[in-house]
Amino acid sequence: MTADRSGRTGPPGGGLLVAGTTSDAGKSVVTAGICRWLVRKGVKVAPFKAQNMSLNSFVTREGAEIGRAQAMQAAAARVEPTALMNPVLLKPGSDRSSQVVLMGKPVGELSARGYFGGPGSPAGGSSLYAGRREQLLGTVTECLEELRRTHDAVICEGAGSPAEINLRRTDIVNMGIARAARLPVVVVGDIDRGGVFASFFGTTALLSREDQELIAGYLVNKFRGDVSLLEPGLDMLRDLTGRPTVGVLPYAHGLGIDEEDGLRVSLRGAVRESVVAPPHGADVLRVAVCAVPLMSNFTDVDALAAEPGVVVRFVDRPEELTDADLVIVPGTRGTVRALAWLRERGLADALVRRAAEGRPVLGICGGYQLLGERIDDDVESRAGTVPGLGLLPVRVRFAVEKTLARPVGEALGERVEGYEIHHGVAEVRGGDESFLDGCRSGAVWGTHWHGSLESDGFRRAFLRRVADAAGRAFVPAPDTSFGALREEQLDRLGDLIEEHADTDALLRLIEDGVPKGLPFVPPGAPALPAQRPRDPDSGGPPATAGTEHVGAPAAPAAGDTPDRFDSLEGGNA
């Protein structure tokens, strides 16, 4: 591969799909690490994930919503994130449906059965889905082709496992896109969970012959101990499958990057695991984050946890707010649902008491909305008018159109950048001072802006205000740069690949494509079972493949109407 070729218009660049034996096997971090390793070699590289399911999303400069993991991977590749990198994003809005975001814009709310097809569909339901699947596959393939035309290499990330045999016929993110684009596939397994050899072998053996032809190797993630003890197993795996292991990545503490929905993967969790600098003042600052249902963009608090002396934890009981110096009500895809949850658990009363005592509270996006006087929601929950907590002089009306923006402004005398992802429109009717697009009333702040705390000067100014209100002798560190910390983490991912992966083998796969002559590992993919008739005694739908998936909207009730976009409506990010 050559150095950066801006404006590249030649043959398609190289490609690789990073799949996993399970969800959270490490696909996101490995993809990011390969991107950072390549860009440090002078390769113009881009990340890609055909279909993502996450409540952590990001807004690109052109106003498109994509998974935050792909934005992180773009940062690893040192390129600007675009909708091409994540053409399909599913955002859960309930236990039964997800909002479908296509090319950065919401297009509907869809059940799992409607998205993946399945039993109980009208006559021809499967063929109806097949048409949609072909359309989506065409869209994601075109996006990948465009990225390959303009980059030397594209590193693709799969979702869940490629061996989810009930969903193979509808797959567009694992072997579906690999087959369409003839991508070599490296399968990542988390050895820290145990059973990694069985997972590698079973993943391969459950794929069809055509899919197995693309499985080019394995990569072990999160290994602890002496690699020489693992090598006999790797040799036996190669004998069994005919495929090499292209790397054994050690368990790395304190790797905090933006993945999808696991709370343990973001930076603040990593800070709790690692040794951090002591506080600059006499006191630490304790931050409690209400773990509301459908919590989204919880990465907003990562920048706080990166500050020496700031302790961040997630809570779901009112007594856990007692010793908190700051309580954050984060974003959610279900504002009315989150409000009811706060009331049911007694957290709403605790927040009201805090406000009356002048103790700091910050609401972000959906959390900001529920702190207001009332919510008029005929879009997300269709609950109509619902009283809020009344802590801010704000009234919220849900609009059908989603606000997607990258605002820049000033607050507390400091420049602030952020991003907005919400359907709620807030009318500010007073307050002690404006606060970004929201307001402050007493010790309660609210804003729709995600990511504002990543602006270093603003974050320090805000923490000083919180410390003053809380009566804490806390002093923000004068030199903490969240952007620099993020770059250090991405460089650590690149180091893991460079130092512990077979980079020559990875380069050959990226440049030369699928190796020839990879053997078939029996038994291969089983045939999908024929649809069983409905059980007249149970009255329930027939059991069939294709209705369950870790990364899919939950299966709807028997009476749900399948194969339709319910609306253009949704909720907050």
Image (cartoon, grey):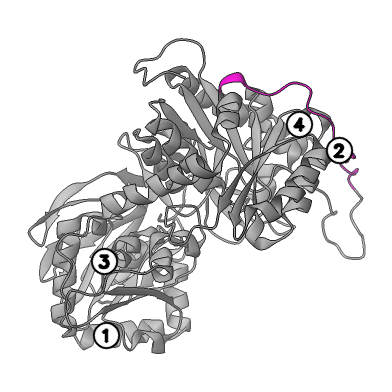
Magenta segment, which residues?
511-531
Residue located at (40% from left, 29% from top): 41
Asked if marks 4 and 2 touch (Cβ < 8 Å), the reply is no
Q: Quadrant of residue 226?
A: bottom right
Amino acid at dot 4: Asp
Instruction: Give me the C-alpha separation between circle 2 and circle 3.
Output: 51 Å
- Residue 110, percent across and down? 59, 47
Horizontal relation, residue 416 to residue 63: left or right? left
- What residue is disc 4 on? 211
Type of residue at label 3? Answer: Glu
| Crowding near the residue tagged with mark 1, few <14, some 14–19, many ≥20 C-alpha atoms within 10 Å | many
Dot 2 falls on a residue whose secondary structure is loop
Label 3, secondary structure: give it.
loop
Foreground tag (4 vs 3): 3
The residue beneath circle 2 is 524
| Nearer to me, 479 or 228 | 228
Q: Main secondary structure of the magenta part?
A: loop
Separation (CA) of disc 4 from disc 1: 57 Å
Q: Earlier in the sequence, mark 2 or mark 3?
A: 3
The circle drawn on residue 354 is: 1
Which x, y percent locates residue 68?
Answer: 42, 47
Tag in front: 4 or 1: 4
Secondary element at tag 4: helix
Q: Is residue 70 visible?
A: yes
**Which amino acid type is shown beneath numbered disc 2?**
Gly
What residue is drawn where x is 91% and y is 59%? 535
Q: Callout 3 environment at 10 Å: few (<14), some (14 to 19), or many (20+)?
A: many
| Frontmost residue, 45 versus 339 | 45
In percent of width and height, residue 427 lies at 22, 60
Q: Is residue 61 magenta?
A: no
Nearest to the observer: residue 543 or residue 41: 41
